[in-house]
Amino acid sequence: MKTVIIGGIAGGLSAASQIKREDPGAQVIILEKSGDVSYAACGMPYNLFYKDKPVEELYALDLDTIRKERGIDYRQNHEVIRIDPVQKEVAVVDLINAREYRESYDYLVYATGNKPIRLSLPGFEDNDVFYFKTLDDTRLVKKIIYEKAPTNALLVGSGYTNLELADVLYNMKIPPVILEKSATILPSFAEEIRAKVLEKIEEKGITLHTNVDIMEKNGTVVSTRAGDFDANMVVVSIGVKPNTELFSAAGGELGVAGAVKVDRFLRTNLPDIFAAGDCAEHYVRQLGRNGYMPLGPAANKQGRLVGSNIVNSKAMKMFYGIDQTAVFKFFDLTVATTGLSERQLGEIGANYVKIHVDTPTRGAFPGGGIMRVLLLLEKGTGLILGGQMIGQDVVAKRLDVIATAIYKQMTVFELAELDLSYSPLYSPVWDPLLIAANKAAKEA
């Protein structure tokens, strides 16, 4: 059995590793366009802090381990330019040696990830504009920071990436200015959570402009409807889109947000072609349908399942799905979400209740902080539909408890009875989750 995988970052390498794990004799070829191997993209902003720490330290595995220990034929700088689903082969360009060749397959895994949405405006193809999506982007930003010593930075977009970058650049003494086209930031978060992020932006003296329409960039000056901004460095992070042109050109069907349409087994409409990761749809359990939320954990889970389903083609398993759990850091705050958002609940016409509480994260012990817990629950039944948190100290792991509760379809009445650990070093005697659950139980 021969499997060709297009893309070798998260989903692609996970698929390859699982195939070799279950069938050591299988032939697995990864064709990766870049010169890198699978890496932890979420660590890129924090690598900027360290002048001499190579970005290659973000690699999940080194090339020798992939090739020798896992037995995977991993080919860097090999770009697939065409898929022929009838002949079951791909056309490949070896970018280093400038030669084109064809590679046949029994199974094909499409794992090309996504790419940044670019600003098609004058000046935004300049060398001092970065989209901060790949390790090459990180290399270039580090080069600018440590060789040109910028005195300020303009961040276009206010999503997770640029908020994390704002934190990093601020602490590197490079004052950031954020421009956001929408009326507010973090639209998937409730106002009660968003307000705390805005408070932190104001506390740090970071300039944020919303409702901004950008017109052009001329040299170091970015012209907008809100005025002109002079910047030594510009980072654009206004969203991503699935990298699907190659698949679509081969007759592949696209779905939500232009991602590769997949069934629950992660098969596409093309014979013996699977898709995984940031280029593919993701089944959202609570909605009972596919959505698109490109994050590393889902990409790795999908890749592993694709690998297993290729080996076990007569006994394939379904992708269980995601609960839309995500977290990011913003200065001393952790901001996290799981389950459905208010916007999604409104779209499906749910009858829901929202509560939030502010509470200390620890008992009578130095340190800790304050956190805000927000719960969304079904009116009448108390079924937990979503949860969001923001605060200092241990936030992410508490959010994981809510993610688990949603996975098991628990109610706030059940959440209130959980036997959570207590020590003043880690929690008040009533954990913030229990306080929130008890308040929610009264509103259900």
Image (cartoon, rainbow, N blue to C red):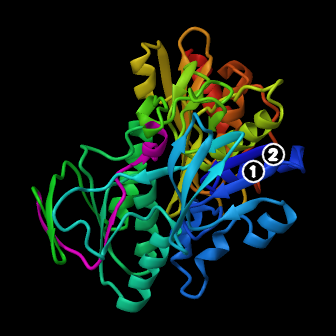
Rendered image quadrant of residue 349:
top left
244 or 170: which is nearer to us?
Answer: 244
Foreground: 54 or 388? 54
- Label 2: element kind: helix
Magenta-span inclusion, residue 242: yes
Q: Is residue 134 left or right of residue 151?
A: right
Residue 411 drawn at (x, y percent):
67, 19
Question: Could you tell me which residue is drawn at 43 percent across and 65 percent down?
Answer: 132
Q: Quadrant of the N terminus?
A: top right
Q: Residue at x 63, y 63 (%)?
A: 39
- Residue occupying image coordinates x 34% and y 47%: 185
User: 10 Å neighbourhood of mark 2: few (<14), some, or many (≥20)?
Assistant: many
How packed is label 1: few (under 14 Cα within 10 Å), some, or many (20 or more)? many
Give the percent coordinates (x, y) of residue 225: 9, 56
Of 56 and 198, nearer the camera is: 56
Q: Which mark is residue 189?
A: none
Say left or right for 283 vs 247: right
Q: Amino acid at mark 2?
A: Ile
Helix, strand or loop for disc 1: helix
Contact? badges 1 and 2 (CB < 8 Å): yes
Please report the bounds of the magenta region as a residue range: 226-248
The answer for how far apart the CA atoms under marks 1 and 2 are is 5 Å
Pointer 1 residue: 16
Instruction: Determine if the magenta segment contains residue 9.
Output: no
Work out which residue is located at the far bottom of the displayed protein and give it. Answer: 147
Residue that label 2 marks: 19
In the depicted structure, whether residue 143 falls above or below residue 305 = below
Place of residue 262 in the rendered image (x, y in percent of width and height, measured from the top left) = 58, 29
Q: Is residue 289 above or below residue 1?
A: above
Q: Residue at x 56, y 68 (%)?
A: 77
Could one spot residue 242 in this view of the protein? yes
